[in-house]
Image (cartoon, rainbow, N blue to C red):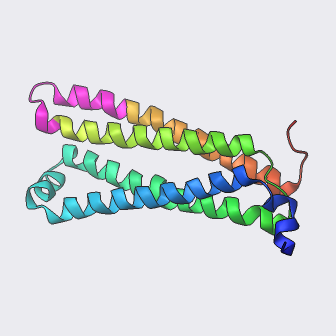
Amino acid sequence: MTQEQNEPWAQDKEYTKYTLWFIYACIIYSIIGFSWGALMGGVPTFRHFVNSGIPGHRLVLGHTHINLLGWVEMAIFGAVYYLIPRLVRRSIYSLRLVKIHFWMHNLGLLGVVVFFSSAGLVGIFIDDDAESVASRFMSLAGIFGSIVLLANIIWGYNIYRTCNGWNRPK
């Protein structure tokens, strides 16, 4: 066994699994986001719709959020979950909070993207009352965005408690 394998923070296989899941999610979201961007820029009809006003802008919001909250944040979370226990030489404060963070963040992100996209697509499929329907979708995107925010607060709390070496929860 190497010295690192003897360390308590290197022993938890479930923690390692969740840390890797953040990285795997990052990869999946990056592929989705990059493909979406290529589609928006490469297909003239789609590019015209995206550039034509508010409905197209809402599709851009979906694309932006899957890249920022999916690709970028998931990479950061995975890296921080890997580095912090090694840096402070102690286990993560709460594996349970890591799991909650992962699932809440993904649920919130998917909701944000689905409802931003739905609000944008309404302009294509509904002639009458499209803005009223889109407004409801935008409200739902905001609710799911609040779930992402709460997940990020949980992450910050867990990292803070880990760094400060406070007692682990029972």
- Left of 143 or right of it: where is 3? right
How far across and how far down the image is residue 114, in percent? 34, 39
Eyeballing the image, is 59 above or below 5?
Answer: above
Eyeballing the image, is 104 above or below 88?
Answer: above
Q: The N terminus lies in which quarter of the figure?
A: bottom right
Q: Residue furthest right?
A: 167
How far across and how far down the image is residue 112, in percent? 40, 40
Q: Is residue 95 visible?
A: yes
Q: The C terminus lies in which quarter of the figure?
A: top right
- Left of 150 or right of it: where is 2? right
Residue pictured at 56% horizontal, 40% vertical: 103
Q: Nearer the viewer, residue 44 or 79?
A: 79
- Magenta range is 123-139
Residue pictured at 14% horizontal, 55% vertical: 46
How far across and how far down the image is residue 28, in percent? 42, 57
Eyeballing the image, is 46 above or below 116?
Answer: below
- Left of 52 or right of it: where is 58? right
Q: Main secondary structure of the magenta part?
A: helix
Residue pictured at 33% horizontal, 63% vertical: 34
Q: Is residue 73 visible?
A: no
Q: Is residue 132 covered in magenta?
A: yes
Eyeballing the image, is 62 above or below 73?
Answer: above
Count of numbered marks:
0
Q: Is residue 149 covered in magenta?
A: no
Q: Residue furthest front?
A: 1
- Left of 43 or right of it: where is 92? right
Residue pictured at 19% horizontal, 34% vertical: 122
How far across and how far down the image is residue 24, in percent? 51, 58
